[in-house]
Amino acid sequence: MEKVTSLCKRRGFVYPGSEIYGGLANTWDYGPLGVELKNNLRDYWWKTFVHDRDDIYGIDGGILLHPKVWEASGHVANFSDNLVECKKCHKRYSTDRLETKKCSECGGEFTPEKKFSGLFKTFIGPTEDTASVAYLRPETAQAIFINFKNVVDSFHPKLPFGIAQVGKAFRNEVTAGNFIFRDLEFEQMEIEYFIAPGTDWQKAFSSWQEAMCQWAVSLGVREKALTVREHNEKERSHYSKKTVDLEYEFPFGIKELWGLAYRTDYDLKQHQNASGVNLEYQTEDGQKFIPHVIEPSFGMPRTLLAVLLESYFEDKKRIILKIKPKLAPIKVAVFPLVANKPELVKKARETYKMLRKEFLVVWDERGNIGKRYFSQDEIGTPWCVTIDYQTLEDETVTVRDRDTMKQERLPVDKILPYFQNMLK
Ligand code: GAP
């Protein structure tokens, strides 16, 4: 974990939030490589669950929703954490996740348990006293429920169908996280999958469970590092009839990666009652009902962390991030063999520009080739292309593979289709 954290900082994946001011606990900023990895993960998620299916519609709802949304959804009343504080060192613990009766830092006694809301509050209007309270959304899901009728009216989808959304969620987490595992703000990738009441919800549930596991494996996560754990009654959210966590073997323990819940018709019913708007779905043969919903919910930071942990390898000479090429922040690095031969640099620049039109490519002419290779291995770049003296004679270049370190000579006009094919 320390090695991955330090690589993230050093090479520009993830930086501590507000670092020059001493940091802001549980906040992180994504650097140039982190943002590329995050974008690739998000695009791949969207492709898998929205574009490659014909039963899922994407939306992008607001971060600020009407405050009544959060009253109706039950979050104002229920979205809270029970906390205790160490009387000696003042470290706070969530009692839901507490495994000891004494402070693990200093052995101190705990204060009595207190309830803390997990909602971030803000104000809409010119001054706080006259303004109305609003909340930053703690889950993206509610924007889906309140747009259910809009999507049905615009697209007339047949059940079962889903609505997907990716975006930031905000939670006033008071206990410290493990790197980006538990954050105050983080992206969620969620689907509300609507089914007719009385249909076999267990079947839809298991098929989503299977889809989630498969997606994790397609990211490069080892199947044996994943477990499915069902929530007991005490753990389950107020809206859920069944919840499972897809857990991952993080270095700090087996913990929740993503969640899957059967939310029944709870949310749509609550919004129908609170808004007075009819949210029933009408079938072609005229039946009317409130659909039930299965919710696969993916968190971006934990996804990114699992991908980095699974990709990290070391040998005597080098650190390698064996990220799947389709997810790698940079696809190709282009090098002139030496920086002081204008003919080589010119040819390498042409190659760099040609590849750059298609995907993210970097240029490096510092130090020797071996160092440049290792520098790219450490950030997961799958291929390096070197332009050398032979290139000037026969228009071939060296393509070096990150994982095998094997080099092959290819005609320069064949490398673009070669990489495109490898990225399929
Ligand atoms: N809409 C359902 C929902 O939000 P959740 O289990 O509370 O369910 C879903 O959250 C996912 O969001 C989690 O599995 C996790 O990946 C991610 N997540 C939740 N809280 C987080 C936090 N404070 N920091 C980072 N990721 C978080």
Image: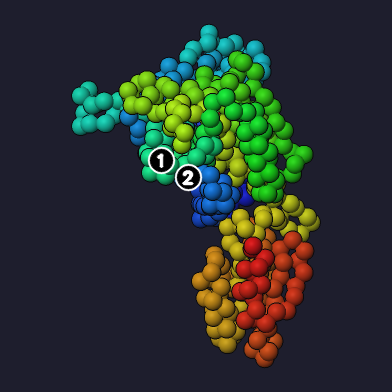
Determine the image quadrant of residue 406. Answer: bottom right
User: Residue 102: where, in percent of width, then height?
Assistant: 64, 14
Q: Residue at x 51, y 44 (%)?
A: 56
Q: Mark 1 or mark 2, which has the lower sequence index? A: 2
User: Residue 60: where, in percent of width, then height?
Assistant: 41, 43
In the image, residue 300 above or below residue 94? below
Q: Residue at x 71, y 63 (%)?
A: 402
Some atom of ligand 1 lies within 8 Å of the CB belonging to the residue at label 1? no
- Asked whether the viewer can see residue 175, the reply is no
In the image, residue 405 above or below residue 391? above
Q: Residue at x 54, y 48 (%)?
A: 54
Label 2: few (<14), some (14–19) or many (≥20) C-alpha neighbours in 10 Å = some
Q: Secondary structure at mark 1?
A: helix
In the image, residue 366 above or below residue 240? below
The amino acid on which the numbered mark 1 sits, given as a three-letter code, is Val
Q: Is residue 290 left or right of residue 403?
A: left
**Label 2 sits on residue:** 57
**Label 1 sits on residue:** 151
In the image, residue 98 above or below residue 373? above
Q: Secondary structure at mark 2?
A: strand
User: What label does residue 411 carry, if any?
Assistant: none
Determine the image quadrant of residue 94. Answer: top right
Question: Across the whole image, how many numbered discs are drawn on residues?
Answer: 2
User: Residue 99: where, in percent of width, then height?
Assistant: 66, 18
* Residue nearer the viewer, 187 or 17: 187
The amino acid on which the numbered mark 2 sits, given as a three-letter code, is Tyr
- Asked whether the viewer can see residue 282, the reply is yes
Instruction: Give yes or no for contact between labels 1 and 2 (Cβ–Cβ under 8 Å).
Output: yes
- C-alpha gap between disc 1 and disc 2: 8 Å
Q: Image quadrant for the N terminus? A: top right
Regarding ligand 1, which quadrant of the image does it lie in? top right
Q: Image quadrant for the C terminus? A: bottom right
